Amino acid sequence: MTDSVTTEVRSSSPKEAVGRYGIWSPGLRSEDPAQRSEIAESAAELEQLGFGAAWLGGNSAAQHAVPLIEATSQLTVATGIQSIWQYEAADTAARFAELDAAHPGRFLLGLGVSHAKLADQYRRPYASMVSYLDALDAAGVPAERRVLAALGPKMLKLSGDRAAGSHPYLVTPEHTADAREILGEVPLLAPELKVVLETDPDRARSLARGALAMYLTLPNYTNSFLRFGFTEDDFANGGSDRLIDALFAWGDDDRIRERIDAFYAAGADHVAFQVVTDQDGFALPRPEWRRLAELLT
């Protein structure tokens, strides 16, 4: 790949900092000391492969970024996504300041409101996010160093007005086009995209349904799908083929590249790839990351 950040001086532009391609993985945020070495090695390899950003999948925080940043020289490390319910704004600001002082410009704070089923404190998500951003502003966390998980129009607009942009999760190119229209040209738009490096349709869709199952129980996602033309019938039996094919890139190299290109054509600046395999979700699929890097070259 040739689109990653390669200069020693960190750019102030979030788009340049994350580059064109990134990797999204919950395995990169493990707190198991036994995995710290492999996480560092994985981060170094991702940078060498040309990925511009590593997204710490799941409810991650600044402290999870440290091993990756210390193991690399240019890779942007981002939370994807830190729940505003789990971390107080003052604590988030303090951790951000500490990390940025040690490694200026290397960390991007991704924030989200999570889901009612996953957060006991969940209430008035939009207003709560606005209050959280107010507190970060007061503590000196720059708007250009944070992005918001955003699916609906109000949160997307907020991500353009009060942050560097948006990191939408589990979306389609159609959502990306709508998000770009709401955000305007300048803010960063960095959707997550799940990739299954499998050509057999039954095998690929089976792996995809396994990865999708939990999300079909969360109204924030299903409501988003409904806004873009899917129906309740598409949620049955682990997801219809139509839904699976819209949310996942799978097939041979040409088909996967075509699906990725659709996100850029719709207005994405950066795509964060989550490679889906038959391994545990916290595994680090390094052979698949290498293959993906070759596919993207």
Image: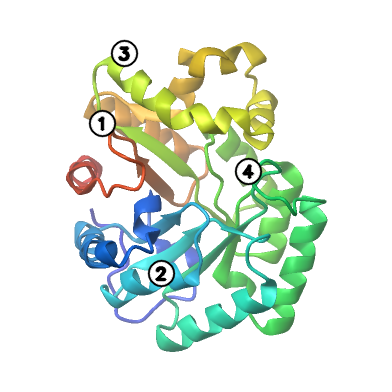
Left or right: 186 in relation to 288? right
Of callouts 3 and 1, which one flags the residue occurring earlier in the amino acid sequence?
1
Using the image as rendered, state which of residue 41 and residue 227 is in the foreground: 41
Measured in 3D between alpha carbons, the distance from the residue under mark 3 to the one under mark 1, in whole angstroms, is 13 Å
Q: Is residue 239 visible?
A: no
Residue at 21 percent across and 49 percent down: it is: 286
Q: Provide the residue designation for mark 2.
A: 65
Mark 2 residue type: Ala
Return the disc, 2 or 4, that comes first in the chain's sequence: 2
Q: N-terminal of the two: label 2 or label 3?
A: 2
Does dot 4 land on a helix, a strand or a loop?
Answer: helix
Foreground label between 3 and 1 = 3
Distance of label 2 from label 4 (alpha carbons): 27 Å
Q: Residue 110: percent from the left, percent from the top?
A: 55, 61
Query: Which label lies toward us, 1 or 4?
Result: 1
Which residue was labeled with disc 4?
179
Mark 3 and mark 4: Cα distance apart in space: 31 Å
Q: Which mark is residue 202?
A: 3
Q: CA distance from mark 2 to mark 1?
A: 27 Å
Disc marking residue 197: 1
Depicted 206 relative to depicted 135: above or below? above
